[in-house]
Image: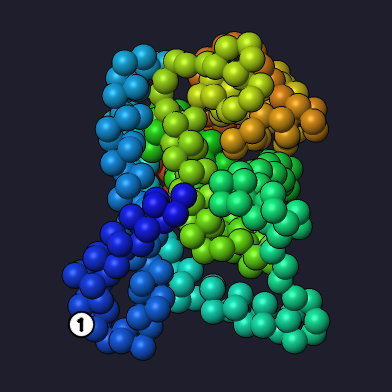
Amino acid sequence: MDTLIDLFANAQSALYESVMQPVAFALGLGNRLEDVFDATGWLLVGLIQLCVMLAVIGPLQRWRPVEPVVDKQAIRVDVMYTLIHRLGLFRVVLFFSVEPWLDTLMGELRVRGVGTFHLDGLWPGVTDGPWVSLLLYLIVFDFLNYGLHRAQHQWNWWWALHALHHSQRQMTQWTDNRNHLLDDLLHAVIWVFVAQLIGIAPSQFVAVVAITQLFENFQHANLRVSFGAWGEGLWVSPRFHRLHHAIGWGHESQPKRGDKPAVLGGHNFGVLLPCWDVLFGTANFDHAFEATGIRDQVEEGLDYGKGFWSQQGLGMKRLMQALGFSSVS
């Protein structure tokens, strides 16, 4: 772990000194160099992730696809979403807008006696080891992800945003970041707040985020792969997650037919570990590779947008409708 941390730190320093620092001074951000250094770390993580996606997951998709790719334009839009996130553009917004507010909030909480504790220090000598603590934080944040994902499918206003993610009929490794930006912002704010609350080290937080994101890319891949009778219960596979995106099954508590109204809910919300779905009764281990999309999109022709800006705009309209302020035209 120390060797990996050192390698990453050296690469981050080199990228910062050779590229990011001069750019920061050129843009008049000399007073925000610490934030720029942090942003350099996220940029480096994103570049590593893109390399893994292109070199590993991409060939796997071509090796054993679930379905032929017929809508390349939809996938190009997903690539745009991925680049926005993995090249740090979304993270820059957090650095300069949300995180200062969160730092102020945490400072106020500490003044009031609500101090940050270190979760990995609860069992000295065991959980304070680097690999053990990383595993502990992966489990904690995966449980948080499960809870957030259930909320996205249970609350009408949040589903109005999250539905964009499910509107992709051609799932690939790029689909993971196909989200409404406000949805991503809410998710990121909660993650950063919890991270500060439980005292995870910055380097381990970066590792947890990077590992989670890469496996999400793999799970969304156009890849006909399952992990078998035992493996499916241990780790989320592309087949397990594809069922979450299946028309009706993934975003409805029970498949509805005819004129019956759909009920928000669904199956297979786990991000890394299926155990949360098993524990809370939302697991579905059927071995089918279903068509993906949203029922009203397929059966009623509801428009979720073709391009980036239309998708973002329609998402806001759905949100306003869910909150009772307007209707979607």
Residue 258 vertical position relative to residue 19 in the rendered view, above or below: above
Q: Residue beneath label 1, please?
A: 26
Front residue of 205 and 307 = 205
The residue that appears at 49% across and 60% down in the rendered structure is: 203
* Visible residue check, residue 266: yes
In the image, residue 202 above or below residue 143: below
Using the image, determine if residue 171 lies above or below residue 286. below
What residue lies at 27% left-to-right and 32% top-to-bottom? 55
Res. 37 image quadrant: bottom left
Percent across and percent down for residue 325 are 67, 61
Under circle 1, the secondary element is: helix
Q: Residue 221: x and y, percent?
A: 42, 28
Q: Is residue 72 left or right of residue 122?
A: left
Please indicate whether residue 309 sits to the left or right of residue 181 in the image: left
Q: Please state which amino acid type lies under the numbered disc 1.
A: Ala
Q: Residue at x 44, y 36 (%)?
A: 217
The residue under the point 67% across, 83% down is 107
Report which quarter residue 195 is drawn in.
bottom right
- Residue 23 position, x and y percent, is 22, 76
Side of 318 where 323 appears, left or right:
right
Q: Residue furthest front?
A: 125
Judge by depth and name the residue closer to the eye, 253 or 120.
120
Colour pattern of the rendering: rainbow
Q: Position of residue 282 (x, y in %)?
A: 75, 28
- How many discs appear? 1
Q: Nearer the viewer, residue 40 or 92?
A: 40
* Visible residue check, residue 308: no
State left or right for residue 318 relative to residue 38.
right
Q: Quadrant of residue 100?
A: bottom right
